[in-house]
Image (tube, rainbow, N blue to C red):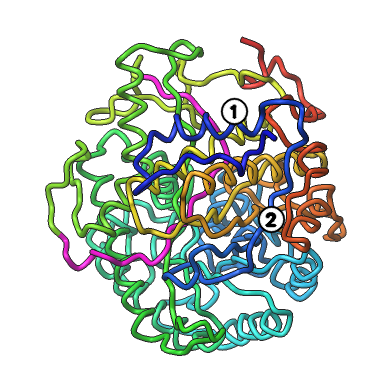
């Protein structure tokens, strides 16, 4: 019988070629006429340490700014508020009440419980806890504590992210970007500048407070979310608050921003380890601390077509290093590549070994080109990201893989080889997919994305990777940052008039998989494989590059 889990190849030290292992397993899984076998999953366990090895978590994820109402002290509130109302009017929509996830938190926890998942990854809003520098809002702490108490009663394991793309306005006021008066209590001027060290200290104090107040209910913490993605958008391209543009000064201004953010992670890690000494769930671990990296299946491209040009291949490799590895190298090795040339040139022993588990977050495959580069040396490349395309963007090989509301290709098979590459680079590091999902209006498409992601990840597990779980993005539709409310990522659709939640086919299927701890033959035959997906609706393919045929 031809079965994916019957693959007998091993990966000692996970050093075998990711491509060779992945293709071998995929071919075995696809060959013959036998139905795909049911995949079963072990019990949930810790994300770190030997005791959790071989365990598996099913979870869902959200972020505070993207769902919470009454969140007036964040930089995103000021950034997106209409100019006529005193804001900056940036982005496609005012975040406003988002999905009313703060008011409706208990209702949303009921949805998590209904799904039957093990865990809920969410963020605590720093701006809500400390809306004014050094002034703590006890009502906000009480709110989050009530949420955690309810989760414990429901048997839902919390994973708390402490910094997920948002700040109190006083960290970097986007309305005073020039910071003419220098750092002060109402505006520390952001990362990478004279107030950067103070922000690092302040965030360390915030992490200490969170660990002290919630450590009896929380063992799993995430420090930062998608650092390079966030910093590039907020400080490189000016698309997120505070709106600085430094991408043309990679090795000076932008590197200084990254250095502060790495330091902040390390300070947060040590603060939590010191302050959270209570084993909340009885597994012998009082605090396991990780962070999450944005990853993508980057492919060499030129003139909006796949490329085999050596310069484009080299550009792809440079971007993978910068996007996937620079940050993690720093916090595992205690070094820093200050000129981004691929070789560390600074020693930072204070950063070393500040990682217990590593989260990976995957959504798309996209092109990278050395032709007409927009990013200067040492990058010398253009990547296909929103608003940037000088020929680097690619049509999807199958137009149904295109995610038109995001403008990229949602290629699910790409996640497995990336996981294998991370396991090879960081042997012994437990991995977990802390986000993966799709923007779609079609419930069956969402179910297909879930099943195909899990199939790809199962092939990585077959290859010997210590992978401990999958968190779907997202529980509900949400405010998708610069894209506003147009993309729909939720297992539960939100009606922005009534704020009611309605389960999609994706929620039904994911709930079946999580509750049964099995990706069944029926699930795989109905939603899996590597053929065309159910088509998206409501868009013009001629206006979306990734939807066009080669």
Quadrant hosting residue 321? top left
Residue 373 vs 450, above or below: the answer is above
Q: Position of residue 136 (x, y in %)?
A: 48, 84
- Residue 46's disc is none
User: Dot 2 corresponds to which residue?
Assistant: 40
In the picture, the quarter occupied by the N terminus is: top right
**How far, Cα to Cα, is label 2 from label 1?**
20 Å
Residue 33 in magenta? no
- Residue 27's disc is 1
Q: Which residues are magenta?
A: 348-369
Q: Position of residue 205 (x, y in %)?
A: 36, 80
Q: Is residue 315 left or right of residue 70?
A: left
Q: Secondary structure at mark 1?
A: helix
Q: Position of residue 249 (x, y in %)?
A: 25, 37
Camera-nearest residue between 435 and 496: 435
At label 1, counting other C-alpha atoms closer than 10 Å, the crowd grade (few under 14, some 14-19, many 20 or more) is some
In the picture, the quarter occupied by the C terminus is: top right
Residue 349 in magenta? yes
Quadrant hosting residue 194? bottom left
């Amino acid at each position: 019988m031809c079965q994916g889990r019957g693959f007998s190849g091993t990966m000692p030290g996970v050093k075998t070629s990711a491509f060779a292992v992945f293709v071998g397993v995929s071919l075995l899984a696809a060959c013959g006429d036998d139905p795909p076998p049911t995949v079963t999953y072990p019990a949930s366990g810790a994300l770190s340490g030997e005791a959790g090895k071989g365990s598996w978590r099913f979870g869902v994820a959200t972020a505070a700014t993207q769902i919470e109402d009454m969140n007036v002290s964040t930089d995103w509130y000021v950034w997106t508020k209409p100019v006529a109302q005193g804001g900056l009017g940036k982005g496609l929509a005012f975040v406003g009440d988002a999905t009313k996830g703060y008011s409706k938190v208990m209702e949303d926890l009921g949805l998590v419980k209904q799904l039957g998942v093990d865990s809920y990854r969410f963020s605590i809003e720093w701006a809500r806890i400390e809306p004014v520098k050094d002034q703590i809002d006890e009502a906000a702490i009480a709110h989050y504590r009530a949420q955690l108490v309810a989760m414990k009663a429901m048997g839902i394991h919390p994973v708390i992210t402490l910094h997920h793309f948002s700040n109190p306005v006083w960290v970097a006021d986007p309305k005073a970007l020039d910071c003419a008066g220098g750092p002060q209590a109402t505006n520390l001027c952001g990362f990478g500048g004279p107030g950067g060290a103070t922000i690092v200290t302040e965030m360390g104090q915030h992490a200490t407070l969170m660990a002290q107040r919630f450590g009896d209910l929380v063992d799993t913490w995430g420090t930062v979310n998608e650092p390079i993605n966030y910093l590039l958008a907020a400080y490189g391209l000016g698309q997120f608050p505070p709106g600085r543009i430094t991408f043309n000064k990679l090795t000076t201004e932008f590197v200084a921003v990254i250095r502060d953010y790495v330091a902040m992670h390390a300070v947060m890690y040590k603060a939590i380890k010191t302050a959270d000494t209570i084993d909340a769930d009885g597994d012998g671990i009082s605090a396991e601390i990780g962070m999450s990296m944005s990853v993508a299946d980057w492919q060499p491209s030129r003139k909006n077509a796949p490329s085999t040009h050596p310069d484009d291949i080299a550009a792809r490799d440079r971007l993978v290093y910068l996007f996937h590895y620079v940050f993690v190298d720093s916090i595992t090795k205690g070094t820093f590549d200050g000129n981004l040339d691929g070789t560390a040139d600074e020693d930072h022993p204070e950063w070393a070994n500040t990682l217990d588990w590593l989260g990976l977050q995957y959504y798309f495959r996209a092109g990278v080109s050395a032709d007409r580069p927009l990013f200067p040396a040492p990058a010398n490349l253009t990547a296909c990201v929103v608003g940037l395309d000088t020929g680097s963007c690619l049509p999807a090989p199958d137009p149904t893989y295109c995610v038109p509301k995001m403008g990229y290709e949602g290629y699910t098979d790409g996640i497995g080889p990336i996981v294998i590459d991370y396991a090879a680079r960081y042997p012994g590091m437990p991995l977990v997919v802390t986000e993966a999902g799709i923007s779609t209006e079609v419930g069956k498409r969402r179910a297909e994305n879930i099943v195909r992601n899990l199939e790809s990840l199962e092939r990585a597990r077959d290859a010997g990777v210590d992978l401990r779980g999958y968190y779907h993005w997202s529980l509900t539709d949400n405010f998708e940052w610069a894209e506003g409310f147009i993309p729909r990522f939720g297992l539960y659709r939100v009606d922005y008039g009534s704020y009611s939640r309605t389960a999609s086919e994706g929620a039904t299927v994911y709930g079946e998989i999580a509750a049964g701890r099995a990706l069944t033959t029926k699930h795989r035959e109905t939603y899996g494989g590597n053929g065309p997906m159910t088509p998206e609706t409501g868009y013009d393919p001629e206006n979306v590059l990734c939807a066009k045929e080669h």
